[in-house]
Amino acid sequence: MTAAHANPAAPVERDPHYNFGYLDESTKRMLRRALLKAVAIPGYQVPFGSREMPLPYGWGTGGIQVTAAIIGATDVLKVIDQGSDDTTNAVNIRRFFGRVTGVATTESTRAASIIQTRHRIPETPLSEGQIMVYQVPIPEPLRWLEPSETETRTMHALAEYGGMHVRLYEDIAQYGHIATTYDYPVMVNGRYMMRPSPIPKFDNPKLDHSPALMLFGAGREKRVYAVPPYTSVKSLDFEDHPFTIEKWDECCDVCGSEDTFLDEIILDDRGTRRFVCSDTEYCARHVAEQQAGIQDERETERQPAVEVGADTATAERLHLGEVL
Amino acid sequence: MYVAVKGGERAILNSYDMLDDYRRGDPALPELTLPQIQAQMPLAVSRVMAEGGLYDTHLAALAIKQAAGDLIEAVFLLRAYRTTLSRLGSSVPIDTARMAIERRISATFKDVPGGQILGPTYDYTQRLLDFTLEANRHTTPLAPADEPLAAAMPRVTDILQHDALLQAEVPLPGDPAPFDLTRDPLSLPAGRDARLQNLARGDEGFLLAMGYSTQRGYGNTHPFAAEIRYGSVEVELFVEELGFAVTVGEIEVTECQMVSQFAGNADAGPQFTRGYGLAFGYGERRAMSMSLVDRAMRASELGEAADAPANDQEFVLYHTDNVEASGFVQHLKLPHYVDFQASLELLRRLRTERAAGVDSAAADASASGADMPIVDAAVVGSRRAAADADCASARNGAPTAATQDQELTS
């Protein structure tokens, strides 16, 4: 909160008062050790000495500490919240790292080396060498079955996961479906049950055998866990009730995608709504690619280049994602 | 609209300015200075230092000013700053028996060596609003007391311990370095060192409520306030090169020692046991509450019934911290529309299926042993076809979509 914040377009300046990544080097080392252990035991929750960060607990302090521990001067950071780079919390975290590291930031999923996220995995497939950092509110998958940490740690040690299957079965008996829609429990590497943070179950299949490294940080609960690249991540289900993901009858109103996770936008108080991609970067790129495709077509047909009107329409559609 | 806007960054920056303006209030009035807060709101400063886990009256005053008087926000500011400080060393334990006393009372004995010292307290002020404070009052400096306080002010619990009436508090075998809650994650069952550290930074309101609950029957320990003392103590650092401890400063602390009856067991006869409370600065309510909760959490190790909330280590220790609690409660104002959308999708599907199930049940009243309701495939199919047509037009940049966009933008 200083007076020198007039121009939001200007890049955030590196604040020399703070160590690179805010945390001191011994704290980063402690975190890296915990992360190495987490990678070595996929899905296992490793306790770590979580520090108070200058952002509130529950707002991504676990993810922020993980990112702070692994980020280097040449990294390119992307931060998303609800799939979007533009939500206020994502903007704030990106500004924080701009201030305490000065690293390059991006909205492009492909260009990023570290992607910190809350509640989504990007639609663009991840690649080798990329690291996803998840902000985790409650790391314990068994927490709603058993409030005691002492008990749940024992249950993990014994791989005593029957209770979760019973819960899913009860859903089926009562509703005809498994009624867990986000934070859907998974088995990692056939051993530990893991909470994939509150991503919609739509994103669960992206965790399985992903070429990217997945790191999960829960600051308030003081736990980190990980899914190494190319590791099996299986969503819990039954033979006669296989795991399924959400489907919409609608497609994205902006880019027309039919296979992405959609946000519902309420337009008025008479029930009019529309659906748009939750991953705004994917959506914008999709539109740009379509536009380029249209241009190619027209050029091959030897017609004049895209008229101004089409450009404007695209620009306006892009703008929609920005405004909402 | 605050979500997902491209202008999010500008909105955030504007919110800084608005907050600055809100905090400052009427610029016609003189601005609060940090020395004023330190001198005239010392109890607020004490609470922020205690829960912030950092003894620095200047920084605490700054945090209070920056937080516009929201003490939990001030605690948060101080904690976040604390993370950046490097640790130079550990002091030797402070000795509260050698405290320069400002206040010292015992509820267990009418008189104690050194006497009862009421000191600065609200206890007997009758809580009548003092309208003379409305205007700036000219105060004369306090005249020195007729006679100085007694040089020796032994702790009441030390006196009790002489007679072995009170369970002695002895270091663990080998006197290991205490657990450090600020560096290591809490693990359960937690040792008393970790528990006391947790309580020392815990939210005063939470400690008060938990302590109060023990008095109302949820894990009663029949406590007596053996002694409460407030004053300043020296902080000493052992310097290896010198071979002795040197005083590096003085801090004010409030200490409360409650004693509770203990029926005894096979190993020990009946004795008094201790609940301990310590707070930075002057924080009597806090120290008393802490000592009640500390004793309540010892119930199971002393073989007492331990089924009340205050006896439950895990419940208490995981919920004391107001920086954690405040952040997590307030994170609910962050957007959750992805999870909400996932729930919405399920709810709609369940309701559609239920309606379809009800319809088919009505049509075929004689049907028995109906299975899971099945969605009307024809209905879904026709909706899907209509949706597909929309998708195709969206992909081709349908003008209708563009028109809608304009409406939204304006």
Image (cartoon, coloured by chain):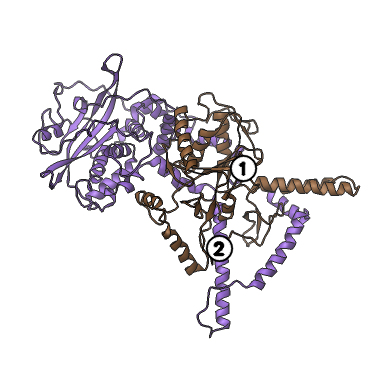
Chain colours: A brown, B purple
Is residue B410 shown to the viewer in this render?
A: no
* Depth check, front residue: B280 or B123: B280
Q: Tell me the crowding category of disc 1: few under 14, some 14 to 19, or many 20 or more residues within 10 angstroms, Cα based.
A: many
Name the image quarter holding residue B244.
Answer: top left
Left/right placement of residue B367 relative to residue B126 reads right
Q: Residue furthest left?
A: B163
Q: Amino acid at mark 1?
A: Asp
Name the image quarter holding residue B107.
Answer: top left
Q: At 58% across and 52% down in the image, what residue appears? A: A203
* Depth check, front residue: B210 or A266: B210
Task: List x then y, in percent, for residue A35.
Answer: 48, 38
For disc 2, the marked residue is A242
Left/right placement of residue A32 relative to residue A5 reads left
For disc 1, the marked residue is A86
Mark 1 or mark 2, earlier in chain: 1
**Chain to which the residue tagged by mark 2 belongs:** A
Is residue A146 shown to the viewer in this render?
A: yes
